[in-house]
Image (spheres, rainbow, N blue to C red):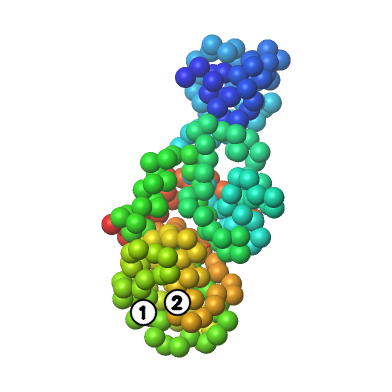
Amino acid sequence: MKLVKLIANLGYGSRKDVTQLFRAGRITDADGEVLYADDVVAYETIRVDDEPLDPPPGLVLMMNKPLGVTCSRKDPGRVVYDLLPPRYSVRSPVLSSVGRLDRDTSGLLLFTDDGALLHRIISPKAQVAKVYEATLAQDLRGDEGPLFASGTLMLETEQEPLAPAMLEVLGPRHARLTVTEGRYHQVRRMFAAAGNHVETLQRISVGGLTLGELPPGEWRALDADEVALIFNGAA
Ligand code: URA
């Protein structure tokens, strides 16, 4: 791919804007030598204003989504894309969140511009385990574990029962739930079906990938080994 198109696709501006960057000598190699639009150079040597280029397509990020931000592109309030560099919202191919977390759910949220990878992660067939920790408005009754594990729990308005999910009781009003699907408000609706109400909800892992020490509101790119971890234990 020609350099102008490659750099424009990363969100640095239109092709016209990027052509101007070349003309102004702002695109160089790692030694500061000015590059020309038809040069052929290794991606990792390209600098814009002395900074390395953003990562190439195939980007996978994880964010510790804070409370109060929406997984949407157009929402009157704060959206998850506001927490990423502005250029990341205008890249091509488009960078999308992998599924969604509710505005009032925090925790591990993935983003990628790789559509095939995105579908592989969210496909119920892949059985990627999503682990949530919930605090509840009322004490657990004791029958939630078998109910969620049954594979017969039918949520209102759904046509198919939920796949079996695993509940671990962490306290009278505190539980960890592992699900392999991503239905709308799934965890909140599961506890509602068991006569309870979720007060706080956090996603702590997706497959074998955990949040680690990533603080709320922060994000980082994943390497290939971390992406592979997502499918640890998957079907
Ligand atoms: N289940 C929910 O109810 N909300 C989320 O954000 C994720 C899973």
Q: Nearer the viewer, residue 223 or 161?
A: 161
Q: CA distance from mark 2 to mark 1?
A: 10 Å
Q: Residues within 10 Å of mark 2 (few under 14, many from 20)?
A: some
Question: Which numbered circle lies on residue 193?
Answer: 2
Query: From the viewer's perspective, is the residue at label 2 or at label 1 nearer?
Result: 2
Residue at figure coordinates x 55%, y 27% from the top left: 9
Residue at figure coordinates x 42%, y 48% from the top left: 227
Residue 204 x/y as whole percent: 50, 64
**Element carrying mark 2:** helix
Q: Residues within 10 Å of mark 1 (few under 14, many from 20)?
A: some
Above or below, 232 against 54 in this view is below
Classify residue 68 by image quadrant: bottom right
Looking at marks 2 and 1 on the same chain, the residue that comes earlier in the sequence is marked by: 1
Is residue 117 in sight in this rendering? yes
Q: Mark 2 near ligand 1 (CB under 8 Å)?
A: no
Above or below, 30 against 61 in this view is above
Question: Which numbered circle lies on residue 63?
Answer: none
Is residue 30 in sight in this rendering? no
Quadrant that contains the C terminus: bottom left
Residue 200 x/y as whole percent: 59, 72
Task: Give yes or no for contact between labels 2 and 1 (Cβ–Cβ under 8 Å).
Answer: yes
**On the picture, is 19 further left or further right than 180?**
right
Q: Mark 1 near ligand 1 (CB under 8 Å)?
A: no
Residue 88 x/y as whole percent: 60, 38
Question: Which numbered circle lies on residue 147?
Answer: 1
Above or below, 168 against 123 in this view is below
Q: Nearer the viewer, residue 123 or 63?
A: 123
Q: Nearer the viewer, residue 229 or 146?
A: 146
**Element carrying mark 1:** helix
Amino acid type, residue under disc 2 in the picture: Ala
